[in-house]
């Protein structure tokens, strides 16, 4: 987990300007700006998958990386942690004398990331590289489908070579899994069962029906704009099918064989508490994701109080609509969820209409934000269905940021597996969270920032980014985009869902709740579809702490907005506040407070 966080913190397009400055690679760069560039360069150059995601080099004809996969060996991970310690020592040596406030801000942001990296070294094995949510087994086909672009024959040939490299990568991951087994870090039994089922189904398909093949075929057909494929192109497709059979499927069999043997050693204990030093590992996970030092007990109790408050607000709206709420929250929400008028037809046409309606909602709010924002993203956003091969265990939705070169828009992926998990009254809130003014809005603005070190364009502080997206849901309501009372229930239900997360995440990992206890609590306190609840609880089990970041971040942004309102009175302008929050990119919450305090002080002097 930490490796991914650090990598995505330090992404960049700096490879375009490597030029003659890299004589400083093995020494302390003369300026801190060169040091930032050095870190970015060193991190990105060793990640061909990151390079493909960024699509910077391809745009200038450099493609030597796109037939390779990342080195996932334990040795490479150990090397990364050594680099982090070296980077921290060098960063500490730069004097802040003469730095501007913004330059100090950049240094503090990077130091925060490096500090977390140093702390995480002791817990580098406390992860589940194969899991039902974002495991290597599903990430690989998803990466090939979404990130490996095919614009000419060479790209297709590289796609096939990249597939052939997966056995090496999976062997490296397997070495790490065995180290975890030796350290008594074994996934819960249900994780092993889910992943085994997924992998067995994956290799059961004929090669020509596998997403790796069908995605390549679709991309090649797009090049030829519907024309018949050439002889050379058909040859590449035939090679792709052969590679799937001879390289990809045997790579998956490595995992299947290992997980089959591991199942007998697994237990039904799900929380991090069961692992060696599990309590300390969980506290670090909370710090990583919330950028606070909040204890599990504090977060748990905060969740309980917010759950009670929001449920009462929902019941008040239902009562105002003339509905019977005498049976309490759980019954009232079950009655609401049972009404067929709130769902689309359980058909292909119904699912296509959901995607169209999501896009309409995004387009509508995008046209009505001038009173709240000056800054706008340049990148467009599109709505897509989560690939069907993984939607059964995927979350309800997720966002993928736009590529730097502008070739790929931001993407809001919606899970359409269970039609009952998409009530109409919850759709606006989900669209605002994932797209505009939520994730797409914030992450695109961050990526498009000018005049900041490149690592700040990709800093992945979850409490900030997820807190913003949850804040965006409330902001849309405040701006009048959820006037229908049932849409407002959808908004409150989404906030309630994030509050319940505070309870169940800490319940599972600190208070020794079972998976079933957590599922029952979420079912009884959200009104969500059971399929969604199960996948959510299973997500929290394999990604400890992440689910707490949303509500913690939202509360902080609202507190800071109120602080600015109280301090500035008539001088307060919502657009100014949003400028301060968005135009510095993602930051830890204490640094965000410093930014707002600086804004208040400057505004008072006007």
Image (tube, rainbow, N blue to C red):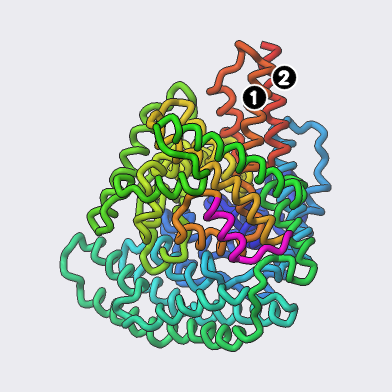
- First in residue order: circle 1 vs circle 2: 1
Q: Is residue 400 visible?
A: no
Image spot of residue 325 (x, y percent) = 47, 39
The part of the chain drawn in magenta is 511-524
**Membership of 516 in magenta stretch:** yes
Cα–Cα gap, marks 1 and 2: 15 Å
In the displayed structure, 243 sits above or below 312; it is: below
Image spot of residue 68 (x, y percent) = 49, 72
* Apparent side of residue 273 relative to residue 224 in the rendered image (left or right): right
Residue 601: assigned label: 2
Which of 442/515 is in front?
A: 515
In the displayed structure, 386 sits above or below 64; it is: above
Q: Quadrant of the C terminus?
A: top right
* Apparent side of residue 27 relative to residue 215 in the rendered image (left or right): right
**Mark 1 residue crowding within 10 angstroms, few (<14) / some (14–19) / many (20+):** few
Label 2 SS: helix
Q: Residue at x 60, y 45 (%)?
A: 499
Label 1 SS: helix
The residue identified by callout 1 is: 562
Look at the magenta stretch and give its main secondary structure: helix
* Apparent side of residue 338 relative to residue 47 in the rendered image (left or right): left
Q: Quadrant of the N terminus?
A: bottom right
Q: Is residue 469 visible?
A: yes
Q: Which of the 4 image quadrants contains residue 249?
A: bottom left
């Amino acid at each position: 987990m930490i490796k991914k966080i650090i990598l995505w913190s330090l992404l960049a397009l700096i490879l375009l300007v490597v030029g003659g400055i890299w004589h400083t690679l093995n020494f302390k760069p003369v300026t801190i700006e060169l040091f930032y560039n050095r870190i970015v360069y060193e991190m990105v150059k060793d990640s061909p998958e990151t390079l493909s995601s960024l699509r910077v080099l391809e745009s200038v004809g450099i493609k030597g990386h796109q037939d390779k996969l990342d080195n996932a060996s334990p040795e490479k991970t150990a090397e990364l942690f050594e680099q982090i310690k070296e980077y921290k020592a060098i960063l500490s040596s730069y004097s802040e004398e003469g730095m501007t406030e913004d330059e100090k801000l950049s240094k503090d942001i990077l130091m925060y990331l490096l500090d977390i990296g140093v702390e995480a070294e002791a817990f580098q094995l406390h992860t589940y590289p194969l899991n039902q949510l974002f495991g290597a087994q599903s990430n690989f086909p998803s990466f090939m489908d979404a990130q490996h672009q095919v614009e000419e024959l060479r790209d297709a040939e590289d796609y096939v070579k990249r597939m052939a490299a997966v056995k090496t990568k999976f062997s490296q991951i397997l070495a790490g899994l065995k180290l975890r087994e030796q350290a008594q870090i074994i996934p819960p039994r249900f994780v092993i069962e889910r992943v085994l089922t997924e992998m067995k189904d994956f290799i059961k398909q004929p090669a020509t029906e596998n997403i790796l093949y069908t995605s390549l075929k679709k991309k090649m057909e797009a090049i030829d704009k519907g024309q018949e494929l050439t002889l050379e192109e058909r040859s590449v497709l035939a090679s792709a099918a052969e590679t799937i059979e001879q390289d990809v499927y045997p790579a998956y069999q490595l995992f299947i064989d290992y997980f089959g043997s591991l199942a007998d050693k697994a237990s039904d204990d799900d929380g991090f508490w069961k692992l060696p030093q599990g309590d300390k590992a969980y506290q670090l996970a909370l710090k990583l994701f919330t950028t606070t030092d909040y204890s599990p007990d504090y977060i748990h109790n905060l969740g309980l109080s917010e759950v009670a408050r929001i449920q009462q607000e929902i019941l008040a709206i239902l009562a105002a609509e003339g509905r019977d709420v005498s049976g309490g929250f759980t019954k009232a929400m079950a009655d609401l969820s049972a009404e067929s008028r709130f769902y689309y037809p359980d058909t292909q046409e119904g699912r296509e209409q959901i995607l169209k309606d999501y896009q309409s909602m995004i387009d509508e709010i995008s046209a009505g934000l001038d009173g709240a924002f000056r800054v706008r993203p340049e990148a467009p956003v599109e709505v897509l269905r989560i690939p069907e091969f993984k939607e059964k265990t995927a979350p309800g939705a997720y966002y993928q940021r736009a590529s730097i070169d502008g070739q790929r828009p931001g993407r809001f992926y919606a899970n359409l597996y269970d039609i009952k998990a998409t009530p109409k009254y919850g759709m606006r809130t989900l669209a605002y969270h994932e797209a505009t003014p939520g994730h797409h809005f914030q992450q695109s603005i961050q990526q498009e920032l000018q005049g900041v070190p490149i690592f700040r364009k990709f800093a992945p502080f979850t409490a900030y980014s997820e807190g913003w997206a949850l804040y965006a849901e409330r902001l849309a309501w405040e701006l009048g985009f959820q006037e229908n009372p049932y849409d407002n229930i959808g908004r409150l239900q989404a906030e309630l869902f994030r509050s319940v997360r505070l309870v169940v995440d800490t319940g599972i990992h600190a208070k020794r709740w079972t998976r079933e206890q957590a599922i029952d609590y979420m079912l009884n306190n959200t009104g969500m579809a059971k399929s969604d609840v199960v996948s959510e609880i299973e997500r929290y089990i394999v990604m400890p702490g992440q689910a707490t970041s949303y509500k913690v971040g939202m509360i902080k942004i609202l507190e800071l907005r109120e602080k600015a309102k109280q301090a500035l009175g008539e001088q307060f302008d919502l657009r100014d506040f949003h400028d301060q929050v968005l135009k510095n990119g993602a930051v830890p919450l204490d640094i965000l407070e410093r930014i707002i305090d600086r804004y208040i002080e400057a505004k008072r002097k006007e």
